[in-house]
Amino acid sequence: MKIKKAVIPVGGLGTRFLPATKAQPKEMLPIVDKPAVQYIVEEAVASGIESIIFITGRNKKSIEDHFDKSIELEQMLEEKQKLEVLNEIQQISSMANIHYIRQKEPKGLGHAVLCAEQFIGNEPFAVLLGDDIMVSEQPALKQMIEAYHNTNQSIIGVKAVANEDVSKYGIIDPGNKFGRVHSVKDLVEKPSIDTAPSNIAVMGRYILNPSIFSYLKMIEQGVGNELQLTDALRLQCENEKLYALELEGRRYDIGEKIGYIKAMIEVALNRADLHRPLLSYLEGIVEEELVKKLDQRKVPSKNII
Ligand code: UTP
């Protein structure tokens, strides 16, 4: 069955990015000159998705405005003959059929996905999290959709992470591996490194069979007192087969400050208009830092007797 619908949950509070997220959604923070959420929508569209539903919450109106038509702005750009930007702006509002549902309280990612039940109906669908920006030759979601068509079972995107990062993610207990696809025996949300079954972490890409909705209705509050999608996936994998695909490409966790800074730098370095000035700036500051480090190591001559 073709995967035509995607859910993008943006109802979270973004507390790791306060105070920037006090009055604006973290999904609207720009990576160079595009809000993070636009990269996610572009990935979905490039993977063949036709309809997108955002699960929104308080302070998220600017996401709706971003994907809406802006008549005054378009008129102004036309009058000023800024046709290239005009074209870019018009494309944003016609990328896909976009719908919105409001999650009344941020009760967790599992609850956010459950809010999409009526919109999805009885077909497999994609979930993309705005925190994970993937830069890859083949869009990450497309990789997932291709893998799904081999199994027709729910599949989650994964990547190995450093041991010190294991406690930040959902972690899979992997079974057999076929190429880049693992069968999943179990999952744990944010385990300590001592109890983690592996270092293979769930990234924010999922293709889910609609049976996930019945499991989402069975779960209780889990880690962080939230309804966790991971807990519903655990139930799904007890009753059905569940797979995980090792995604190819670079992934940036922009929910965290350091991940956001890395994404900004690397995306800018990949842009023809920014590559040179940014690289020469970075070379300059790295050199300064190295000189400072060397100076600190030198024994001051006045201390030598
Ligand atoms: P996170 O826990 O990473 O996002 O949820 P958060 O809650 O916004 O951020 P922090 O941890 O407080 O900094 C993963 C994804 O699930 C969405 C978030 O918007 C994010 O895309 N989410 C989370 C919801 O849509 N609703 C929720 O109730 C919780």
Image: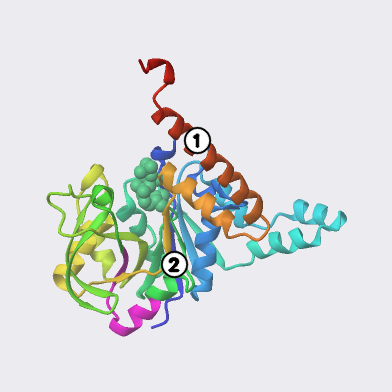
Q: In terms of depth relative to the viewer, which is nearer, 31 or 29?
A: 31
Q: Residue at x 40, y 44 (%)?
A: 256
Q: Residue 260, position in %: x, y?
A: 47, 47
Q: Amino acid at mark 1?
A: Val
Tell me residue 183's x, y (percent): 20, 74
Q: Is residue 299 visible?
A: yes
Residue 294 image offset from top left, x and y in percent: 44, 34
Q: Which label was assigned to residue 6?
A: 2
Q: Is residue 100 above or below residue 147?
A: above
Q: Which residue is mark 1?
A: 291
Near mark 1 (Cα within 10 A), the count class, few <14, some 14-19 or many ≥20, is few
Magenta stretch in the rendered image: 145-158
Is residue 20 something one can see in this rendering?
no
Q: Is residue 82 shown left or right of residue 204? A: right
Q: Are marks 1 and 2 in contact (CB under 8 Å)?
A: no
In reply to whether residue 85 is colored magenta, the answer given is no
Q: In the rendered structure, which amino acid carries the disc numbered 2?
A: Ala
Residue 268 in the image, given as x and y percentages of width and height: 58, 54
Q: Is residue 252 left or right of residue 24?
A: left
